[in-house]
Image (cartoon, rainbow, N blue to C red):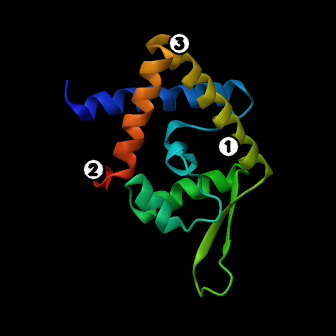
Amino acid sequence: MLIGALLRMPAQAIQRRIIAELNAGGFDDLRVPHMAVLQFPGPDGVRPGVLAERAGMSKQAMNQLLKSLEALGYLTRADAPDEGRARLVRLTRRGRAVYAKMVDILQGVEREWSTELGAKRFTELKELLCRVWESPLAR
């Protein structure tokens, strides 16, 4: 297997799990595409263009997701102070609640993976992925 698939498959599985658990936990209006906005480090205080770049999508596509999440009550978009026409995304109370729930879900995933792989190997996996994250390899 090539590295792309080895990284993509677990990431997609985690996203599906997050959405399934969020839906079961009362956030039943969220779908996998919304993860492009809600993914770490989160959208709060960020410009839509930056979110689009992080997600590897067009600004137009990102704005459609933002519009959807705004209509669902997870975020608002407001003018950035002292920055002309710039807009910033802000999480609402519901948005902060869903983000906190996502952190809880991910902590559960980490516990399960640590059990499955063994604590030492899971720690090594995270260390290697952090090394890639911080390197030019991920840019």
Picture quarter containing residue 6? top left
In the picture shown, does residue 44 fall above or below 27? below
Q: Residue at x 45, y 60 (%)?
A: 52
137 or 87, nearer to the observer = 137
From the image, state whether disc 1 or disc 2 is nearer to you: 2
Mark 2 residue type: Leu
Secondary structure state at the residue bearing disc 1: helix
Work out which quarter of the rendered image holds the N terminus and state it.
top left
61 or 97, nearer to the observer = 97
Location of residue 11 in the rendering, given as x and y in whole percent from the top left corner: 42, 32
Mark 1 residue type: Tyr
Give the mark, 1 or 3, whose residue is nearer the N terminus.
1
Measure how far apart labels 2 and 3 are at the Cα level.
29 Å
Return the mark for residue 99: 1
Secondary structure state at the residue bearing disc 2: helix
Give the mark, 1 or 2, whose residue is nearer the N terminus.
1
Please state if 11 lies on the left or on the right of 80 as rendered. Answer: left
Q: Are marks 1 and 3 in contact (CB under 8 Å)?
A: no
Q: Are marks 2 and 3 in contact (CB under 8 Å)?
A: no
> What residue sits right under mark 3 in the picture?
115
Q: Residue at x 33, y 52 (%)?
A: 135
Return the mark for residue 137: 2
- Mark 2: give few (<14), some (14-19) or many (20+) Cα within 10 Å: few
Secondary structure state at the residue bearing disc 3: helix
18 or 72, nearer to the observer = 18
Q: Residue at x 64, y 65 (%)?
A: 45
Please state if 85 lies on the left or on the right of 116 as rendered. Answer: right
Location of residue 128 in the rendering, given as x and y in whole percent from the top left corner: 37, 35
Measure how far apart labels 1 and 3 are at the Cα level.
25 Å
Give the mark, 2 or 3, whose residue is nearer the N terminus.
3
